Image (cartoon, rainbow, N blue to C red):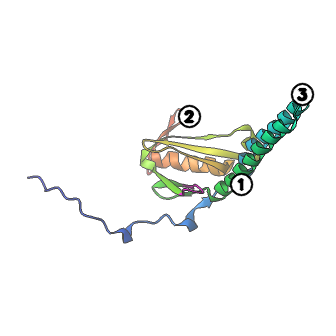
Amino acid sequence: MEEPFSNDPLPLDGVPQLGDEHFVPVDPRYLRVALAGLGLAGAVVIAGAALLATQVERPAIPLAIAGGVVVALVLAAVLRTFEIRRLAYQVREHDLSLRSGVITHSIESVPFSRVQHVSVSRGPVERSLGLATLQVNSAGPNLAIPGLAIDDAERIKSLITARADIETDGDLVPPTGE
């Protein structure tokens, strides 16, 4: 005989908490990586406006437009700085969580049992600073944690790979406990 359907509420006092004190901030050097693109864009805008100002009758117009773009880039840099300072991750027994957002705060968690692929990538600026981005693809949301020291990224990748029992570089990782 089948049991009747039940969907009783669970008490929340026994549910583990994702406390802010346990989140690990990304490496402070990541701020340089994040601001490099904005700095490059600002340099291109200034150079382009200066070149254009020498070629037109009214140089104030391209300079004013460039000034507005530079102000927008500075505001974007300030917002990005706050965003990087909030960016943090937490590795627990069964999942990986990412805290992000300045205006809208969010915390995303991916259980290891849902992970399908994990990789470490490094762009040119990240490589120059010894940083990496951990990318976790899952059956649910995908997480990318930028600004990790390369050793930390590789260590977390190994932990997730072992706990999730997924393939990495063509080799099947044996289940834990064998």
Q: Secondary structure at mark 3?
A: loop
> In front: 69, or 84?
69
Q: Secondary structure at mark 1?
A: helix
Residue that carries the numbered disc 1 in the rendered image: 78
Q: Going from the N terminus, do you reach mark 3 or mark 2 first?
A: 3
Left or right of 137, for residue 58: right
For the residues labelled 3 and 2, the Cα–Cα distance comes to: 55 Å
Give, as a single range, the part of the protein colored magenta.
99-105
Q: Residue at x 51, y 45 (%)?
A: 161
Question: Residue 169's mark?
Answer: 2
Residue that carries the numbered disc 3 in the rendered image: 55
Image spot of residue 14 (x, y percent)? 37, 69
Circle count: 3
> In front: 37, or 25?
37
Whether residue 130 is visible: no
Whether residue 42 is visible: yes
Q: Residue at x 88, y 35 (%)?
A: 59
Q: Amino acid at mark 2?
A: Asp
Q: Residue at x 75, y 50 (%)?
A: 74
Residue found farthest to the top:
55
Q: Secondary structure at mark 2?
A: loop
Q: Residue at x 56, y 34 (%)?
A: 169
